[in-house]
Amino acid sequence: MAANGEQQARQAGVRRTVARTLVVLAGMFVFAFALVPLYDVFCQVTGLNGKTSGRAQALVHADVDTSRTITVQFITRGSAGLPWELEADTRQLRVHPGESREVVFRFRNRGEEASRARAVPSVSPSEASLHLRKITCFCFQEQRLAGGERLEAPLVFQLTPGLPDDIKTVTLVYTLYPVEQALARRYLGFISEGDQA
């Protein structure tokens, strides 16, 4: 009888261990899904990892600091599976903090079919992202191009006068990523008839 009691105690211990392990596993699963949005919020608040605002910002009417000149570089990249090209009309500009500037970017779909893409920005050094104000940017929304179609889109930006003095060069990198129609439907909730590809 004592052996039977020991066996039941052992089984109860195993059940507790399994239950605790499943709870921890479920917690890890939830944490993994929450991590990406939390990281995005953290980067946007702190400016770390070069994340920039995904919305238009107001132009700050401040005095232009003509005593400082910052080199702003533009780098564009494509991604696998997307037959698009993206290039800036200039690779770099010299800008005074407080001054607003416009750069035109050219998209081209080299494929034969219509497709969608989104340009995701990154800023280096990451501290500069806190001082970069994008007034107009093609990166605020996805782009749709028919096969062979071309598009010119502006980026109007401003570096605020609060940009730290030790930052002499700011690099903006735009990476094109394909936007799948099924994902657009799921996350946006709709696709208009004219957008059917």
Image (cartoon, rainbow, N blue to C red):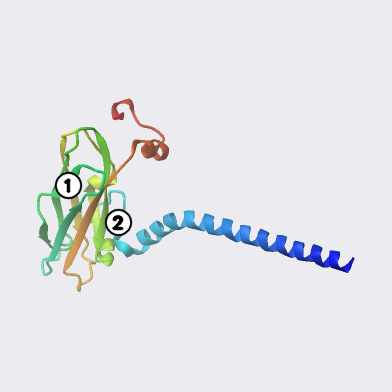
**Callout 2: SS:** loop
Is 5 displayed left or right of 120 in the figure? Answer: right
Name the amino acid type tagged 2.
Thr
Give the percent coordinates (x, y) of residue 181: 34, 36
The front one of 187 and 163 is 187
Quadrant of the image for the C terminus? top left
Q: Which quarter of the figure has residue 5?
A: bottom right
Among the two numbered marks 2 and 1 on one chain, the one whose residue lies closer to the N terminus: 2
Front disc: 2 or 1: 1
Let me know if residue 33 appears in the view: yes
- Taking the spot 85% from the left edge, 67% from the top edge, the residue there is 3
Q: Which quarter of the figure has residue 97?
A: bottom left
Residue sitting at the far top = 193
Give the percent coordinates (x, y) of residue 154: 17, 45
- Taking the spot 68% from the left edge, 63% from the top edge, the residue there is 17
The front one of 155 and 176 is 176
Query: Any mark on residue 22, and which?
Result: none
Q: Distance between the Cα atoms at labels 2 and 1?
A: 19 Å
Q: Which residue is mark 2?
A: 52
Where 182 sits versus 42, above or below?
above
Q: Which residue is mark 1?
A: 86
How dense is the environment of label 2, judged by Cα within 10 Å: few (below 14), some, or many (20 and up)? many
How dense is the environment of label 1, judged by Cα within 10 Å: few (below 14), some, or many (20 and up)? many
Give the percent coordinates (x, y) of residue 57: 27, 51
**Callout 1: SS:** strand
Where 92 sits versus 87, above or below?
below
The front one of 187 and 9 is 9
Give the percent coordinates (x, y) of residue 119: 25, 48
- Taking the spot 11% from the left edge, 69% from the top edge, the residue there is 67
Name the amino acid type tagged 1.
Leu
Q: Marks 1 and 2: in contact by CB < 8 Å? A: no
